[in-house]
Amino acid sequence: MRKQKKIIKTLWNIIYSDYYSGIYKVNLMGKLSRLLYLNNKIVGNLKTKIKSNLIN
């Protein structure tokens, strides 16, 4: 589970590197998280954490 979280966290960092997430990027992340058997709540929390770190 730790490796899957690290993969998703790294990908969210890449996606938000330009401060924009389009519908295709978010759709891809949804598919990848389902393939890695991660809960939507976990993925959402990681996404929120990455976004809040960009603001600060």
Image (cartoon, grey):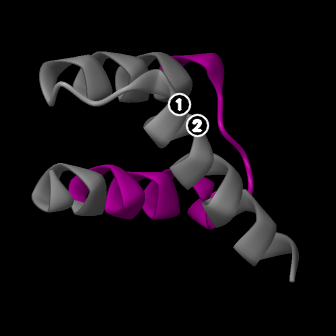
Residue 38 position (above or below residue 54): above
Q: In the image, is residue 3 part of the stretch drawn in magenta?
A: no
The CA distance from mark 1 to mark 2 is 5 Å
Image location (x, y in percent) of residue 47: 59, 48
Which SS type dominates the magenta stretch? helix
Could you tell me which secondary element the residue under label 2 belongs to? helix
Per the rendered image, the range of residues in magenta is 7-24
Q: Quadrant of residue 2?
A: bottom left
User: Which residue is at a point 28% across and 30% down the rendered structure image?
Assistant: 38
- Residue annotated with mark 2: 44
User: Which residue is at a point 12% across and 60% down the rendered structure image?
Assistant: 3
Image location (x, y in percent) of residue 7: 23, 56
Q: Amino acid at mark 1?
A: Lys
Image location (x, y in percent) of residue 22: 65, 28
Q: Quadrant of residue 49?
A: bottom right
In contact (CB < 8 Å): disc 1 and disc 2: yes
Q: Quadrant of residue 55?
A: bottom right
